Image (cartoon, grey):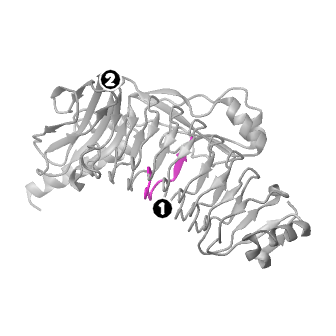
Amino acid sequence: MSIASEIHRIKNCVAEAYTACCDKRATMPQTQNIRNLADTVRSIPQSGAAMLEKKDVNFCDYEGTVLYSYTFSEAAQLSVLPVLPEHTGLTAQGWTHTLSQIHTSVTKGYAVDVGATYTTSDGSSRFYITIPTNRYLTVPLNFEFSASTGTVTVDWGDGTTTTETGSTSHTYSPASYPANYVIKVTLISGELTWQGNTTTNSSSVFGESKEYTTMLKKAEIGVGSIGTRAFNSCSALRSVVLSHTGTYIGAYAFYKCSALKSVVIPYTVTSIGTCAFYDCCALRSVVIPHTVTSIGTYAFYNCSALTSVVLPGSLGSIDQAVFNSCKSLASLVIPDSIFSIGLFAFSYCDSLTSITIPASVRSLATSWLSGPGFVMLDLTAFNGNIPYLEGSFSGYGVFAVKDQSMVDMFSSATNWSNYAEEYVIKDW
């Protein structure tokens, strides 16, 4: 092996070590080289405890770690919320749910996932990028202001600082590759929104081409909402901290972020846009606060690693294909605020073997549930108020009811009568 190839191998190993440190929530230095690596490793937070198993009420960190877990009876006895975690470079802002909201859900028998929210300690937004080769050295940075004017300062991580009033770019001159940088953006004035360049529908904060979108490894948003296509196709993005100042997550915001494993949506957010987490195939954990009143169509389409979702009681409907093709989704409780379930909402959720629908649901769309296997539906709550079924289930269904009178009621109802041979009596 030549000296040059050995040097290249060592540099690649150092870059991989920094990526691993980033995943472990280490404090990342401005200059990422072998001299700083030991200090970076030492900055990895030490939890001091084994991973907890999820129970009925779970308190999670932003990267999905379960910090505290309680049964319904244990959660009902909570008089204060647990202590928030601490991370170097981040300042905890609170939990996504209040104690009152948790107690209300527990009283109704609904599971709760609670997440810790943060801002950055200096108020900046930080983007951790890796430039792999000597191509594509001019790195774009897209953002907009809600009002007509605004100003930020950008520390590009290589000793250069600029003042910007809109989307910009910077040309790097690394001495070697791969080259790691932390871009820090500090808001001076205005209302900032992180989003792709609106002149191209496929752009992101870091541009449009694959070479740019794969540079981003981690994001910590200090200020600003997550707008349309903010991190569209950033397939190397593994970790994100969302600002508690953001009020929405835009359409296609995390579209095809295939390495993203966990998201805590802050309690300031009220809406999640169309296709916001579409095809985030590594996403295992998502915390949705009670402030969210709408989730757009296809929002979690093909999030195939997602095993459970706790929907907030602030939602009024589950729109078209929101959880379509979430093949690992095995647990779902629909809150009693939901009045309609849209087309293909849970189609091809192959692991979903049971689902409880509250009496508040008055309309079920055609093929809201379809795919292979048998699904046990608890229809007991409806009594005489049968929800309107627009059409078929396009699949198999075994419907659990309380007694023979309910069998007769459902088997004679419009469209439900198509399944007269598929009702079973079960003592709930």
For the point 39% across and 46% down, which residue is it? 253
| Residue corresponding to mark 2 | 190
Q: Secondary structure at mark 1?
A: loop
| Image mark for residue 32 | none
**Residue 279 among magenta residues:** yes
Q: Residues within 10 Å of mark 1 (few under 14, many from 20)?
A: many
**Which percent across, then down, holds residue 64?**
51, 45
Left or right relative to 385: residue 323: left
**Mark 1 or mark 2: whose residue is earlier in sequence:** 2
| Residue corresponding to mark 1 | 302
Left or right relative to 78: residue 158: left
Q: Secondary structure at mark 2?
A: loop
**Alpha carbon separation for disc pair 1 and 2:** 36 Å
Which residues are the magenta region? 276-288
Tell me the quarter of the picture where residue 67 sits.
Answer: top right
Amino acid on which the number 2 mark rests in the picture: Gly
For the point 18% across and 43% down, which residue is it? 139
Amino acid on which the number 1 mark rests in the picture: Asn
